[in-house]
């Protein structure tokens, strides 16, 4: 990662690297337990349902609904100062786990619980590919 | 065996609170507060035989042995739960003195939260923030105000809770800080001041957020028996508990993002103490953000879930109100000492030593902690 990229970057571990590799390919990957089939997110080594460590990575469909949000005005990290204020969404993915990402293309005033959104992918400079959310056309 | 009335808070101490007072390092601040607490109890520093330093603080047990010349420290532990640590340490200390491991456990904290490293940079050094650090920090979810704001927003959307109701908490707490006198914030605050303050992370405005300040505080937890011979009126720990929320590392993945660790801890503590919420005369409630107070009032059973907004209206949390809360000014207006100042204040109230902020006749009260991604802790106490 270039030293000129001013935002915080992830430091993946062997447990989480496939998630970031998926984002780089335009896929939002979830872990599915190979033993009992339970989905889990964020990535971690063990299934909390059956304690199996065997898992596979499956792409999320990319649709979800708004669970909550915040509009970030004060940049607690200088890397986000230029784009402030920005909206962070907490989204219920259709698969039953949640995702977080910045919202694009909609003002905060239009937000409500349950609003349908679609996942997208963005890369800024030499930074990592990150998930974002877009409104779903009616 | 229960911890019911097996331990007492026997000593309390704190430094001057403020921002940029240049009064010393985080280590010297907690040594100063600790000496005050030990003297308050009528003990010598060499009597301390147990210690629970803050897990993320600037001092370790060895610093206290070295500085105080403690001859035989028999117990040391940490309770790494962020802002829930100090009150969680009461349970750990009570267990240590009840089982005879030691007699006098020191709970110290000292911080240079204003003069030293600020919160946005500090939290990501903690292992509890590892998950957030990898998956949400790169998206712009940097500091606690942003991490907690979606809980408050969802509460507002589901129950109609308003920013003016959050302002009630900030305004009442400021009034208490002014009564206390030893507080970083000394200027009166109105609802309009709150409503006009700049937005930090919607729905949190500046005055919904706690301070970053410099200072120290400490308490001594002794066995209930040993406390009989000490200087101050005995304040007995009737119930104590800690609780961890589901998905404790990250709020985003929590099945019910409004449900915090206190939901598990509070019923345990009330059952141990043998009292109900309506018996409580004064409550020192962890207030890193106004909303966090409101939500804890619900989880403590003072009102139903969703009714916290209505509960805090009309000065209900003021001295003389329905439930006096944060009678010292809390983290919002007195000082950010991760809630050690809340323990100090509860003991002061129950001893009848709270001066202008004294809740008349208060002999039974509670203190809570809230930390990291919603860890909870609680202690219920009474004057013997």
Image (cartoon, rainbow, N blue to C red):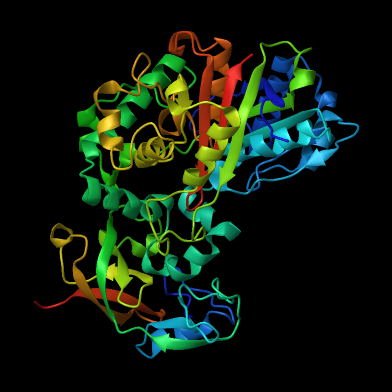
Q: Nearer the viewer, residue B270 or B319?
A: B270
Up the image or down, B282 lies above or below B20; here it is above
Coordinates of residue A24 in the picture (x, y in percent): 40, 87
Looking at the image, residue B206 sits to the left or right of residue B381; the answer is left
Which quadrant: the N terminus of chain B? top right
In this orientation, does residue A87 appear?
A: no
Residue B177, quarter of the rendered image: top left
Residue extending furthest toward the left: A138
Question: For the point 29% across and 64% down, which residue is it?
Answer: A89
Coordinates of residue B147 in the picture (x, y in percent): 40, 55
Coordinates of residue A46 in the picture (x, y in percent): 59, 75
Q: Nearer the viewer, residue B22 or B123?
A: B123
Coordinates of residue B183 in the picture (x, y in percent): 46, 23
Residue extending furthest toward the right: B71
In this orientation, does residue B164 appear?
A: yes
Up the image or down, B84 lies above or below B366; here it is below
Question: For the point 61% across and 40% down, which residue is it?
Answer: B88
Residue A121, quarter of the rendered image: bottom left
Looking at the image, residue B163 sits to the left or right of residue B4; the answer is left
Question: For the point 75% across and 31% down, which residue is it?
Answer: B105
Q: Nearer the viewer, residue B129 or B225?
A: B225
Looking at the image, residue B163 sits to the left or right of residue B293; the answer is left
Up the image or down, B4 lies above or below B56; here it is above
Residue extending furthest toward the bottom: A25
Residue B30, quarter of the rendered image: top right
């Amino acid at each position: 990662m270039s030293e000129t990229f001013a935002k915080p970057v992830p430091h993946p571990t062997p447990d989480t690297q496939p998630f970031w590799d998926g984002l780089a390919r335009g896929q939002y990957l979830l872990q599915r337990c190979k033993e009992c089939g339970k989905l889990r997110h964020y990535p971690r080594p063990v299934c909390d349902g059956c304690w199996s460590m065997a898992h596979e990575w499956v792409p999320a469909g990319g649709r979800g609904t708004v669970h909550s949000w915040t509009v970030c005005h004060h940049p607690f990290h200088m890397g986000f100062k230029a784009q402030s204020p920005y909206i962070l969404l907490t989204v219920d993915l259709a698969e039953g786990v949640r995702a977080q990402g910045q919202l694009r293309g909609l003002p905060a005033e239009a937000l409500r619980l349950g609003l349908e959104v679609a996942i997208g992918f963005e890369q800024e400079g030499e930074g990592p590919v990150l998930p974002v959310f877009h409104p779903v056309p009616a | 065996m229960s911890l019911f009335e097996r331990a007492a808070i026997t000593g309390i101490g704190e430094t001057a609170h403020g921002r940029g007072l240049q009064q010393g390092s985080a280590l010297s601040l907690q040594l100063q507060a600790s000496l005050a607490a030990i003297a308050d109890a009528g003990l010598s520093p060499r009597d301390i035989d147990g210690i629970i330093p803050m897990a993320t603080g600037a001092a370790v047990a060895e610093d206290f042995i070295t500085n105080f010349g403690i001859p035989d420290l028999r117990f040391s532990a940490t309770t790494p739960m962020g802002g829930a640590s100090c009150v969680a340490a009461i349970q750990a200390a009570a267990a240590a003195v009840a089982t005879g491991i030691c007699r006098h456990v020191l709970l110290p904290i000292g911080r240079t939260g204003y003069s030293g490293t600020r919160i946005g940079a500090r939290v990501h050094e903690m292992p509890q923030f590892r998950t957030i650090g990898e998956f949400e920090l790169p998206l712009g979810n940097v500091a606690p105000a942003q991490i907690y704001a979606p809980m408050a927003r969802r509460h507002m959307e589901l129950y109609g809770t308003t920013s003016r109701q959050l302002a009630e908490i900030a305004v009442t707490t400021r009034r208490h800080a002014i009564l206390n006198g030893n507080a970083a914030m000394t200027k009166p605050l109105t609802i309009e001041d709150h409503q006009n303050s700049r937005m930090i992370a919607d729905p949190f405005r500046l005055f919904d957020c706690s301070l970053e300040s410099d200072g120290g505080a400490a308490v001594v937890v002794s066995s209930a028996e040993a406390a009989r011979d000490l200087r101050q009126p005995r304040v007995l720990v009737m119930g104590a508990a800690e609780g961890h929320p589901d998905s404790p590392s990250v709020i985003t993945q929590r099945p019910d993002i409004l449900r915090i660790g206190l939901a598990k801890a509070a019923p345990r503590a009330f059952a141990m103490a043998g009292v109900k919420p309506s018996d409580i005369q004064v409550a020192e409630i962890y207030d890193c953000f106004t909303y966090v107070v409101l939500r804890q009032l619900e989880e403590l059973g003072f009102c139903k879930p969703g009714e916290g907004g209505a509960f805090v209206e009309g000065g209900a949390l003021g001295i003389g109100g329905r439930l006096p809360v944060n009678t010292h000014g809390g983290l919002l207006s007195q000082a950010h000492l991760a809630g050690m100042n809340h323990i100090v204040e509860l003991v002061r109230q129950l001893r009848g030593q709270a001066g202008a902020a004294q809740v008349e006749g208060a002999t039974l009260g509670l203190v809570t902690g809230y930390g990291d991604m919603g860890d909870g802790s609680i202690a219920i106490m009474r004057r013997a």
